[in-house]
Image (spheres, helix red, strand yellow):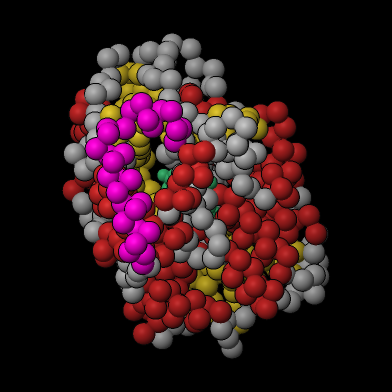
Amino acid sequence: MSGAHSVAILGAGPAGLGLAYRLSLRRKFDVTVLERGEKVGGNAASFPLCGMRVDFGSHRLHPSCAPEILEDLRSFLGPDLLDRPRHGRIRLRNRWVHFPLKPLDLAAHLPITFLAGVGVDGIARSIHRGEGETFADVLQAGLGKTICRDFYFPYARKIWGCDPAELDGEQARRRVSAGSLSKMIRKVLQAVPGLKRKGSGRFFYPRQGFGSISESYAGAALREGVKIKLLTSVGAVETVGGRVRAVQAIGPTGQEWVNADHVCSTIPISQLLRVLHPAAPDQVLASACGLQFRAMILVYLVLETEQFTEFDAHYFPNSDIAVTRLSEPKNYGLADFPGRTILCAELPCSMDDPIWRKSDVELGGIVKSALEAAEIPIRSKIAGVCSRRLPHAYPIYLRGYKEHFARMDQWLQSIQGLVTFGRQGLFAHDNTHHALAMAYAVDECLGEDGEFNRELWSRRRHEFQKHVVED
Ligand SMILES: Cc1cc2nc3c(=O)[nH]c(=O)nc-3n(C[C@H](O)[C@H](O)[C@H](O)COP(=O)(O)OP(=O)(O)OC[C@H]3O[C@@H](n4cnc5c(N)ncnc54)[C@H](O)[C@@H]3O)c2cc1C
């Protein structure tokens, strides 16, 4: 494409591919996507397992997805974008409650002492109202002691691997959509027929797995002339006089330099900082160590039975059960998989933990024991076990992370032609539809004259702060 502005996109997850597709439509950009993995989709990819497609843990597209994005997805996936009811369960004080929460189910299944505790907390809260700086303070002020003690605090310890008091309050504001008793009551009431909001209690899911979202963006972008280089890591981002010039791509056949007027990065912000050439100042580089990501092991068990349970996902806040969430992919997308089903167990951890190096057989044993402890033992034959590892599953908002992030972000923003976005790029908890919204916003900010509208981007970034993650 002669005379076109060259754009290198780092990472082929939903954010990178969403941008590649949008830019390709305008035919003014010569776009190359560099992806370290062997396939597209990042953390939101799917892969085949024993004849079925499975995701990296429980993934669903939430109905709060922007209409413009949903429209594109509908045009890619047509009737294969299923609209499904949510049907999960939470293990709370050794009982099961439905998720999403339902008033009658709560009344029938929650221990009376729990309900009484929440009631007392509600009254106490109206007398003693307070905000706070930590995850623990914010949630305890919003939801009271009982819900925090029995659900959010043990769940937070498992998911992020640290005490709720070590986490910044932002983690509660961005990660807990029902952060106050009134919001929680509103959510519960949404289950009542007649009070339902459109889309509540439902989700979208592509029949062939969540990864079809990224694959369809990739397919559409390729048809418009975008180049996607898989198994290709970013070795360096070269800048000259404070402006990006090229990206070093290290792929299966060696290394090459890809010229770039613009580098749009969705790789972890700390990684991006480390590959800048010339290097960022030491103080900025030191901040890259101040941002921590939680890793995750996904353990898949192939069972010789039609269905394990009728539920799409089980949530386990308690510390005595190693798994945080168990999903049964067949129940999400109505997969045609006769005589078998697959379970996917999520085990958040650190890459330094001994569990990170355990074999599939050992991991299968851990999941089996966890399900026995939760009183849903596996009774059918296990035909196979395999695992996958995500090094960057969740950002951890440890207290003090904001200063580190701000220092890195400020440095990166000073480089002309460079923009960082997506879940890893902005160190955000965001869902896929949020990552796609960021991609569409980058496209909006990149003018056909090759100028990037920083003021508009800053306004869009401000709006992203309002994203609240849904589970
Ligand atoms: C267990 C789990 C469950 C989730 N459930 C949901 C859900 O139900 N609904 C929902 O909407 N969202 C969910 N999410 C979030 C969803 O996965 C993310 O929103 C989405 O993947 C973000 O897309 P992204 O493109 O910003 O980042 P990523 O998907 O992380 O993509 C970044 C890409 O960059 C690549 N990369 C990294 N470093 C380099 C390098 N040096 N060189 C080249 N490439 C590199 C990576 O390989 C990756 O492909 C879940 C996440 C997890 C971990």
The one nearer the camera, 15 or 314, is 314
The outermost residue toward the bottom is 241
Q: Which span of residues is magenta-colored?
A: 101-130
Q: Please give the count of numbered marks on the rendered protein.
A: 0
Where is 377 relative to 269, above or below? above
Give percent across and percent down for residue 236. Answer: 49, 71
Measured as percent of width and height from the top left, residue 223 is found at 74, 45
Above or below 220: residue 35: below
Q: Quadrant of residue 88?
A: top left
State the residue at coordinates (34%, 62%): 127
Residue at (49% x, 76% y) in the render: 409
User: Dividing the picture into quarters, in which one does residue 436 lie?
Assistant: bottom right
Q: Which secondary structure type mostly characterizes the magenta part of the structure?
A: helix
The spot of residue 217 in percent (x, y) is: 66, 46
Question: Residue shown at 43%/54% (left/top)?
Answer: 179
Front in this rendered view, residue 125 or 294: 125
Q: Is residue 322 left or right of residue 12?
A: left
State the residue at coordinates (53%, 34%): 191
Q: Is residue 174 visible?
A: yes
Lateral position of residue 242 relative to residue 224, left or right? left
Left or right, 159 with reference to 435: left
Q: Is residue 112 magenta?
A: yes
Q: Is residue 359 visible?
A: no
**Viewport quadrant of the N terminus:** bottom right
Is residue 404 rendered magenta in the image?
no
Q: As rendered, which of 199 and 207 lies closer to the eye?
A: 199
